[in-house]
Image: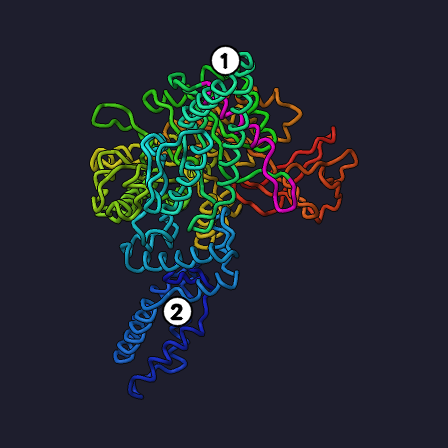
Amino acid sequence: MKIVKRDGRIVDYDAEKIRIAIKKANNDVSEEDIASDKEIDKIIKYIESLKKRRLLVEDVQDIIEKKLVELNKYELSKAYMLYRYERELIRKANTTDESILTLIKNSNKEVMEENSNKNAIVASTQRDLIAGEVSKDLTKRILLPEKISQAHNDGVLHFHDADYFLQPIFNCCLINIQDMLDNGTVMNGKLIETPKSFQVACTVLTQIIAAVASSQYGGQSVNIKHLGKYLKKSEDKFRANLTKKYKGKITKKEIEELVQDRLKEELSAGVQTIQYQINTLMTTNGQSPFVTIFMFLDKDDPYIDYTAMIIEEILNQRYQGIKNEKGVYITPAFPKLIYVLDENNCLEGGKYDYLTHLAVKCSSKRLYPDYISAKKMRENYEGNVFSPMGCRSFLSPYKDENGNYKFEGRFNQGVVSINLPQIAILADKDENKFFELLDERLDLCYEALMCRHHALLGTLSNVSPVHWQYGAIARLEKDEPIDKLLKNGYSTISLGYIGVYEMTKLMKGVSHTDPVGKEFALKVMKTLRARCDKWKKETGIGFGLYGTPAESLCYRFARIDKERFGSIKDVTDKGYYTNSYHIDVREEIDAFSKLKFESEFQNISSGGAISYVEIPNMQNNLEALEDLVKFIYNNIQYAEFNTKSDYCHVCGFDGEIIINDKLEWECPNCHNKDKNKMNVTRRTCGYLGENFWNVGKTKEIKARVLHL
């Protein structure tokens, strides 16, 4: 039997603790009202006879009080209640000591592994994590309604980012970088005017990214097309200066060659500034800025050819990688890259197909960029193409006071996710019961989401000037509340979900790839979407259904349910739930079929969705990868490639550890063949478990991991 503590921790049942608690209460009553050892044993045996897999600590205490009354130990029952009340006061006074001390000792594994982008040993990161533990404690005990805290602890739902809930800050955003560059901005009380060159624009961009990341807790995205005009400014400046200096001395053609040489140097230096600054900056939350660069060749962009030049340089530099501390080129985690496929670059004879060839080459080596189909996105978002916020969370369409669509300068207020497999476990194949439970729990999710909304109401623009006063989101006055930006669909708020596969397996006995399972899974998804649409209509807040990106949550929900309900085949026995609508990795399905199938779920999950396909080493088979990219353009809105990311502990190489004809491991950098000095992990979710290898008849090596 397991005991669920008030802070959500799960510990082994210990009868001795019950004995000690009652004996302490014995000390405060008269002799005739003392419970004997025999009577205490009787209470303990009753609790154990319940044969519960899991009990809340409050339930145990309620049982003890009831049994003391049945034994006519009224005075002792009151004394025990008083003891219980005193312990509650102690808990409310401070419940963070243990979690903070274990962080300092580097033994708080759950917190340390929750965010793979943070190095929990570094002092600055620890400072943020310590503050987060205090915030989580106050959030659970005071800021949230008790039923929401309990639902979070029981794995009914997950209240994301409780470690930042104490502060009036939000999740993620699309920076209005055009406004900040064109109209200037302010940082640390200093005016930053409109850049006069591409290099300066790139430097200002990285300063903005760092400032924005330090005053929110989620990702941010930047549309790189807004730098195109500044590259043109540099070109015009070079041409004017060189013409003035060399007019009449050399030909116009020679002057133009010098202009283009200077421009290429500036382009390379500017992009390098972005890449290196982002990867060397450390924000106040103890990590590099979680930033995504959105690469879209918008046909209506007057500087589209300059944007194309910037994209080409970004891809070339990403293909090369960044040197680690051992001087080996590796793939940087940030900035994440998203490449948009449109009519002009979808490998069907478009003007910018050469960039897509380069993007595919980059993906084959560095996994990035991810791909968005402008064609499919326009179908899903009223003809618009725009970046997700940071990584996968999408805004819903919004029109400003002039009737124009607006996406940049908007944000997400926060996320709450629902545990779908747990509902299916409790429903036990009864579909009516499933939807009754789903309805109840969605009401609970709504209440939790509104807690996020209400926590931001009344926030003054002074809280984060870079966001609210100087253009990242808005240009509000000092001391002006941000409330109008929380309503009328300007910002979004997200309902996440985990485990469509396991839910369907429990209810229908088959995967959601089976026609019977698919019908049920789509019915549930449409119910979730309909509820979000209903909330949006009732409140004016932009509710969205979000394919939750929190891989750690896949483990948390599964762990809680396994402790509560035991090991269930193909559900809790795996140790994880499948993220959102994704197909379970153990199913045999080709990449094209997987993307086509999951595209039907992306259409419903309008608040955010991404699909993965797992690929082997594709550097020598770019044609096959290009076929996959063409398929993405025509069939699915948002997709990402995933493959193994090897690491050599001898030289620090982070790439593809080869396996030669003798089936020996060999690092291509230092030629180390010691398997024990290499490891294979997954960058996408940070999975560190065992990889299962299958050697085919042709000695082709295929790797498959249990979780994406």
Q: Amino acid at mark 1?
A: Lys
Residue found at the very far bottom of the displayed protein: 31
What is the crowding at mark 2: few (fewer than 14 residues within 10 Å), some, or many (at least 20)? some
Q: Nearer the viewer, mark 1 or mark 2?
A: 1
Give the structural element (helix, strand or loop) at label 1: loop
The dot on residue 351 is 1
Residue at (21% x, 24% y) in the render: 402
Q: From what the image shows, is residue 511 above or below residue 308?
A: below
Image quarter of residue 68: bottom left
Q: Residue 231: x, y in percent?
A: 45, 25
The dot on residue 246 is none
Q: Residue 581: x, y in percent?
A: 44, 34
- Magenta segment, principal secondary structure? helix
Give the structural element (helix, strand or loop) at label 2: helix
Q: From what the image shows, is residue 396 above or below residue 684?
A: above
Tell me, yes or no, whether the two marked residues, 1 and 2, touch with CB atoms within 8 Å.
no
Image quarter of residue 503: top left
| Residue 617 as seen in the image, left or right of residue 494 | right
Mark closest to the chain's N terminus, 1 or 2: 2
Q: Is residue 317 magenta?
A: yes
The answer to whether one can see residue 633 in this image is no
Specify start and end residues of the magenta stretch as a single range.
305-328
Residue tagged 2: 46
Q: Amino acid at mark 2?
A: Tyr
The answer to whether one can see residue 53 in this image is yes
What colour-coding does the image apply? rainbow
What is the C-alpha distance between the residues marked 1 and 2? Answer: 77 Å
Q: Nearer the viewer, residue 509 or 684?
A: 684
Q: From what the image shows, is residue 246 above or below residue 523?
A: above
